[in-house]
């Protein structure tokens, strides 16, 4: 299969638990890049939280942030963005605060931790996230979502919930990038570990789950690589991209 684009999730995938890209994985990414493969980071992070890694890798390609909430061109200007309704976000924020959860809300300009500005209606919002160690408490948040219009779960774990506008996901964003580049999803290899990676893994030519991935992600993947702490991304690149070019 002719892989022309490599879509990489960041946390739990390209980054190890220390939030670093290991030298082996970095070298393999750069080898793939030098061979002509386009590298697209596809992350739930906002732009400012992933740009240092872009600089470290010396990438010059598209970028997908906030689970598809923003898509950047190769010069890192915003191509398109999908905004979360401000009133929906405020409703979720106040409910989450009432439950005692920690919250992160991402605007197009900055991130807010456990706070929401008074002028929230004047701000463009991309994503809402909350964190709590008690899964039962998070289930109350999931029930709350059924009563909030203009919001949809994009990722869940036993400790976190991420919420974007309806229909926004990494696969949707990746398809837009492919259309702009004149390639198909069959030319994509996608690697990830969480539920927000599932759709792009399912719709790519080669979908790879990390060994540390959630069970549901492994079930839809074409292959499973090693963990994020043991160079899983680097090993997948070697097996499916670099070896195929020899």
Image (spheres, grey):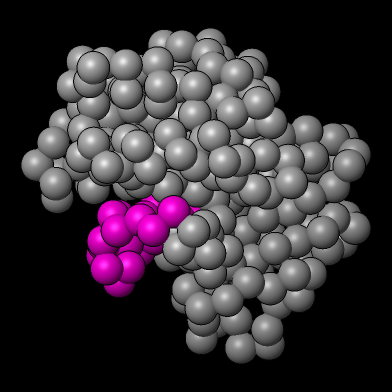
Residue drawn at (27%, 29%), measured in percent from left and top? 188
Q: Which residues lie in the magenta part?
A: 57-82
- Which one is in front, 29 or 183? 29
Q: In which quarter of the image is the C terminus?
A: top left
Name the side, left or right, on which 47 lies relative to 158.
left
Q: Position of residue 164 (x, y in %)?
A: 51, 53
Q: Position of residue 81 (x, y in %)?
A: 35, 63
Residue 4 on the magenta segment = no
Can you tell which quarter of the image residue 208 is in? top left
- Which one is in front, 83 or 184? 184
Name the side, left or right, on which 33 lies relative to 211.
left
Residue drawn at (30%, 71%), measured in percent from left and top? 77
Does any portion of residue 144 appear in the rendered image? no
Residue 60 on the magenta segment = yes
Does any portion of residue 70 appear in the rendered image? yes
- Which one is in front, 136 or 145? 136
Residue drawn at (32%, 16%), measured in percent from left and top? 243
Name the side, left or right, on which 75 lies relative to 163.
left
Q: In which quarter of the image is the N terminus?
A: top left
Can you tell which quarter of the image residue 28 is in? top left
Up the image or down, 75 lies above or below 142; here it is below
Q: Position of residue 92 (x, y in %)?
A: 68, 60
Residue drawn at (85%, 55%), measured in percent from left and top? 101
- Which one is in front, 155 or 233? 233
């Amino acid at each position: 299969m002719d892989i022309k684009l490599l879509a990489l999730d960041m946390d739990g995938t390209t980054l190890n638990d220390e939030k670093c890209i290991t030298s082996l994985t970095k070298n393999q990414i750069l080898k793939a890049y030098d061979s002509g493969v386009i590298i697209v980071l596809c992350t739930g992070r906002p732009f400012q939280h992933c740009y240092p890694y872009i600089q470290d890798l010396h990438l010059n390609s598209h970028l997908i942030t906030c689970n598809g909430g923003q898509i950047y061109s190769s010069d890192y200007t915003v191509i398109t963005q999908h905004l979360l309704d401000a009133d929906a976000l405020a409703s979720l924020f106040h409910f989450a605060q009432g439950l005692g959860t920690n919250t992160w809300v991402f605007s197009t300009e900055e991130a807010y931790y456990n706070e929401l500005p008074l002028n929230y209606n004047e701000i463009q919002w991309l994503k809402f996230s909350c964190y709590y160690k008690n899964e039962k408490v998070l289930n109350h948040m999931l029930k709350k979502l059924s009563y909030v219009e203009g919001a949809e779960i994009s990722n869940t774990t036993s400790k976190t919930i991420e919420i974007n506008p309806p229909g926004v996901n990494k696969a949707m964003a990746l398809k837009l990038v492919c259309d702009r580049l004149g390639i198909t999803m069959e030319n994509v290899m996608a690697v990830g570990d969480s539920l927000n990676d599932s759709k792009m893994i399912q719709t790519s030519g080669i979908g790879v789950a990390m060994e540390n991935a959630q069970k549901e992600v492994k079930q839809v993947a074409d292959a499973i690589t090693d963990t994020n702490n043991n160079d899983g991304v680097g090993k997948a690149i070697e097996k499916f991209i670099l070896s195929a070019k020899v």
